[in-house]
Image (cartoon, rainbow, N blue to C red):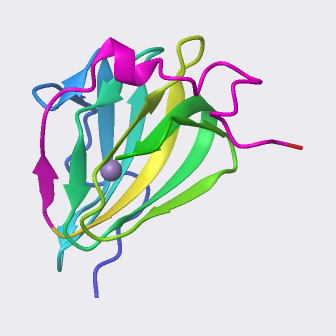
Amino acid sequence: MKIIRGRAPEGASEHWSGTFTGEVWGDPVLPATDGVRINNVFFTPGARTHWHSHEQGQVLHVTAGAGYVCAEGGEPQRLEAGDTVWTPAGELHWHGGAPDSFLLHTAVSLGPTDWRDPVTDEQYTAEGADEGSGGAQERA
Ligand code: MN
């Protein structure tokens, strides 16, 4: 058993680059343990991951702000605080902040991550941000 109180012992926020576009910071909550990693991830407006998949899937829970998640073949879906996303094993996707808002989410990642190409500006802005386009899911 491992109990981690508050932030992971590693402590300091990490500036993540290389597999992200824009300014992204991560706080480890649970360092890699038996293939599970938990991070609090802060995306500045417009920042996002590269395309990627998780070998055994990923849970995202939005704790503050607003952003987007997009699966391969789909359109960006808007996320807001309180929303939870399950991405199944191997599904290519990206996630990040909205153009007009930061995004803070907790990410529970299962297994290794397979990183791919950056998300282009065209992919990032494809329909999802435009209400009424049919791209975004209807919200109450
Ligand atoms: Mn992911």
All told, the count of numbered labels is: 0
Query: Residue 65, percent across and down?
Result: 62, 29
For the residue pair 132 and 51, the one nearer the viewer reads as 132
Please name the residue shown 12% across and 54% down the image.
114
Q: Up-down: is 87 above or below 137?
A: below
Please name the residue shown 22% across and 47% down the image.
52
- For the N terminus, the image quarter is bottom left
For the residue pair 122 and 102, the one nearer the viewer reads as 122
Please name the residue shown 18% across and 74% down the image.
35
Q: Up-down: is 53 above or below 129?
A: below
Is 133 contained in the magenta span?
A: yes
Hey, which quadrant is residue 40 in on the image? top left
Please name the residue shown 66% across and 51% down the image.
83
Query: Residue 31, percent across and down?
Result: 21, 61
- Of all residues, the one furthest to the bottom in this rendering is 1
Query: Residue 22, percent across and down?
Result: 29, 15
Please give the range of residues in magenta.
Answer: 112-139
